[in-house]
Amino acid sequence: MKYYNQLRKSGIALGLCFLLMPLSRLLSPQAEIDGAMLYLAYLPLSVAIAMMFIFGRFALLPLFISFYFWYWQQLSLETLQNLTLVSCFIISLIAGGLVCRRLLGPRWRYALPGKGVGIRLFGFGLITPCVLKLLMLLAGLSLGYPTTIASYFGESSLFYSVVDFQNLFLTASAFTVLFYYPLRIILSKVVARNFWRRCVLPAIAPDKIIFTLGWLFTVVVLTSLFCLPYKAVIISGYMVPVVFILFTMGVFHLGPRLVTLCWALVALSLLSWYSGFIPDENAQFMLCFVLSIFIAFTVSMLFMTVIFQRNAWMQRRYHTLAQTDPLTQLPNLRALELHLERERAGTLCCLRLGNLEILSRHYGLQMRIHCKKTVVQALQPWLGVNDSVFHLPGCDLLIFLAGPEPASRLRHMVDMLNSKRIHWHNTVLELDYGAAWASVENNKDLLYRLIGQLSYLAEQTQMSEPVLALNEREANVSGQITGQVLMLQSVKRALDEDQIMLYAQPIVDGNGRGYHEILSRLYCDGQVIAPDKFMPIIAQFNLSACFDMLVLQKLLHYLSERPQADNEARFSLNLMPMTLMQKGIARQIVSLFNQYQVSFSAVIIEVTEAQAFSDSETSLKNVALLRQSGLRIAIDDFGTGYANYERLKHIEADIIKIDGCFIKDIINDPVDEMIVKSICELAKVKSLTVVAEYVETQAQREMLLRLGVNYLQGYLLGKPEPLQF
């Protein structure tokens, strides 16, 4: 099969050579120089170079045979003379090919106007003509050629030889494309389709069709003026540079392939009918000068194609980067806008990766990226040709579905994802998935509002109903989102204006002595915002550290103005979970105590049970640093989640606050009584202070004190009262 393909290539090359050699020789323009005819562009050399680019080494033997046959038929040379002349051509082609192969590697024949154009120009545009002319001069010294062609072998004037050199340079550099592109298009349907799609279609696109037609019309008109038989000074002296300007514009607007092909046609026409723009006076010198200009412009234009392609590549690269998230390498919202412009309408789905936010705080950003990429990879087999997944900041992904039955397809995707597990550094990540969907059209004004609604609705999904349709809940979702936005604005304004009101609720022992827990309210627009309204907003929009530091600063300011001599605790302050997950927050807290010159013993820092027993290295380091500085640590809501006897055994804290769920029914529920009793007994062994929350009756108070609770908190002991500054 291998040898068959090689023979097939050589056979096709041989047929093309026999067809194109006489045709190219017939089209080659000639002029009389010093009384002898000379080719201004010897097109058989262009055919030979084009065949080398298309067939490589398989073109050498067909070229040798065709050159030998046509020179034997046309020039009637002796066998040795003919073999020598043909060998000059073949050796020069081999030399140019070896240079390109050496410098560009095995793919030297591909992407002709692209990267490596300078090397190809050096190999076939300089080395091949020089080697060819040198070998022909040596052949002329060794063998006697007929008078009709002896001038090509050195038996001519210096001026004649210079023009002959120019002919070879121009032929190799300018006219090779005249045969290369048509042959490639004829021989390969793929090349023909790509040429049409990449070169022709962009040129006749609606935004370029007027320029293309105007450019072609101008080129045709000017070329016709130059080729007409009459002579005019304005044409010969002033109009020729306009052609170069036109082709320079064409390279950057129409692309290199079309323009170089058009330039080859125009240059061939101008050389064939040069008498229309070259005056009779000093015509030979003017022709030499024109050839030099043509060579210089051809080289310049070829390098302009490199600049054009590099600019086009950079534009495509920047266009791609603008539509790609730099971390996940997924299409972003800009890509979604462009996708909607193409598809016009479809279904937009928001896929929520539950628990990803919490897990990413522990495992880091790389885990979040890994999860999103893994999910997208899992979704790929279930996406259609016009479907796509887009990145959304946070824990969401957007899926555009163009096909029918989006609800069932999305439900299948969510069920499939919920059945899979994602691994990260030998750890199985527990993610749950929910999704919301809605019909979408190409309307940028409504797109981002729709995305916000879908994100909110996807967050509300449950295991029993993991896929929700926005169209059925749009009014409710819009109201919820509007309410969230308004609340966020109020919360941010209250924090910016330091409109935080501190309340204190007593925590006392059996004798009525103790301290107070600090509770906060926000004041905005003449209204007090309760914690159940602003706390979710603060947590959701990552304002917890800012909020906690403002509350602590306000409390320390209060204590600094009312110092006490004893070292007893006066207040406890609860820090939100996200606060202690921020690096350096413990040092900021210690710095505030030093700034206000308040004793560390005056304040107890309350942390949630989840933080105390967390695997988060940052949280544990912050808690340890606070405790080392002298602050006592209280674990709030103890017993509701992470606590067990093993963890209680290794706890690093000073106070535990038993959650109110064990206190409310302790009088009637013996299980609650046993739980509280066991916690108190273990705390006593660990020298921990026990606080019971939600104490509302005298019977609860007496039982809790009897079980070993040290401090009580609840409406029975006192309601929150505002601190008086």
Image (cartoon, rainbow, N blue to C red):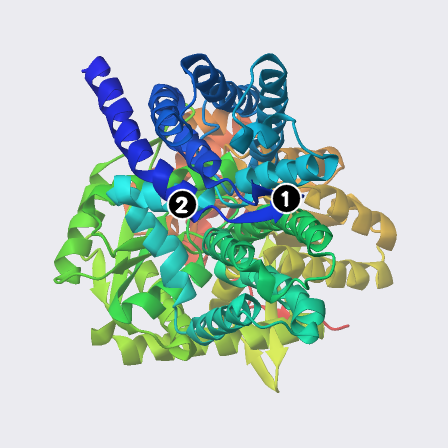
Q: Is residue 270 left or right of residue 197?
A: right
The one nearer the camera, 126 or 410, is 126
Indicate the secondary structure of the residue bearing disc 2: helix
Quarter of the image with the C terminus is bottom right
Q: At 75% from the left edge and 42% from the top edge, which residue is drawn?
A: 587
Residue 585 falls in which quadrant of the image? Answer: top right
Residue 72 location (% of width, % of height): 37, 24
The residue type indicated by label 2 comes to Leu
Name the foreground residue: 559 vs 368: 368
What type is the residue that disc 1 sits on? Gly
Q: Which mark is residue 26?
A: 2
* Quarter of the N terminus within the rendering: top left
| Picture residue at 58% right of the left edge, 17% below the top | 139
The structure residue drawn at horizontal position 27% and vertical position 44%, both measured from the top left corner, is 186
Q: Nearer the viewer, residue 571 or 344?
A: 344
Residue 89: which disc? none
In this picture, is 422 found above or below 521?
above
- Residue 28: percent from left, percent from top: 47, 46
Of badges 1 and 2, the one in the foreground is 1
Marks counted in the figure total 2
* Image location (x, y in percent) of residue 340: 34, 67
Q: Which residue is mark 1?
A: 35
- Secondary element under disc 1, as helix, strand or loop, is loop
